[in-house]
Image (cartoon, helix red, strand yellow):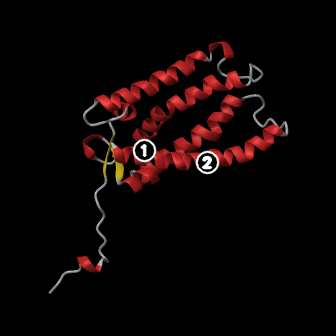
Amino acid sequence: MKRRLLAALLDYCVMLGWLAVLAAVFVPLSLAGVRLWGGRADLVAFAASVLPVWLYLTVTESRAGATWGKRRAGLHVVGPGGRRAGAARIAVRNAVKLAPWQLAHLGVVPLLTNGGADTLVSPALAWLPLSATYALVGLTVVVTLVRRDRAALHDLVTGTRVVPSRPRVRHDDPQLAPTT
């Protein structure tokens, strides 16, 4: 569990770096009165934050079996039977993982814009996606803590698991050279 938390913390640092870049670009534009989204702040929140993070998670886990954080923590994602998880399975896994974040956007953006933006959810109904956010996060935490294998909700939905990586053997290591 400690390694999974370390991996998540390292990956959150990557995500926070991306969000810092977004803030450096969008905050000055917003303060200058520039509205790039034509009033669709909820779509911009998705396209600028959730989608790139989903792509980062999905591409790295599909290609290398692990994100940067998981690799540093000595972990990787596997599919059923311990085999490599396919790209589609990883894509769904990360969509389920990020669903609370996107639901939070759907609830918060209409509240922040005071109904002044054309959003998918009205300010009066913002409590629905916000409630779903907390329900999903709570369910994920409970499932992870209750299960013996510590599988999270997104792993249960997709049949994936996060497991320790096998150590890589370097063939050019002089300590591994055969002795005569």
Q: Which residue is mark 1?
A: 87
Compared to 33, does 16 lie above or below?
below
Compared to 174, does 66 lie above or below?
above
Q: Quadrant of the N terminus?
A: top left
The x and y percentages for residue 143 are: 34, 28
Asked if disc 1 and disc 2 are in contact, CB closer than 8 Å, the reply is: no
Compared to 125, does 42 lie above or below?
below
Which residue corresponds to the image point at 66% horizontal and 12% vertical from the top-left? 124
Front: mark 1 or 2: 2
Q: Residue furthest right?
A: 32
Three-letter code, disc 1: Ala
- Which element carries disc 2, helix, strand or loop? helix
The image quadrant that residue 105 belongs to is: top right
Q: Which residue is mark 2?
A: 18
Which residue corresponds to the image point at 53% horizontal and 18% vertical from the top-left? 131
Q: Camera-side residue: 16 or 89? A: 16
The x and y percentages for residue 86 are: 38, 44
Is residue 58 left or right of 147 when viewed as pictured?
Answer: right
Is residue 99 left or right of 176 when viewed as pictured?
Answer: right
Q: Residue furthest bottom?
A: 180
Three-letter code, disc 2: Trp
Is residue 39 left or right of 173 when viewed as pictured?
Answer: right
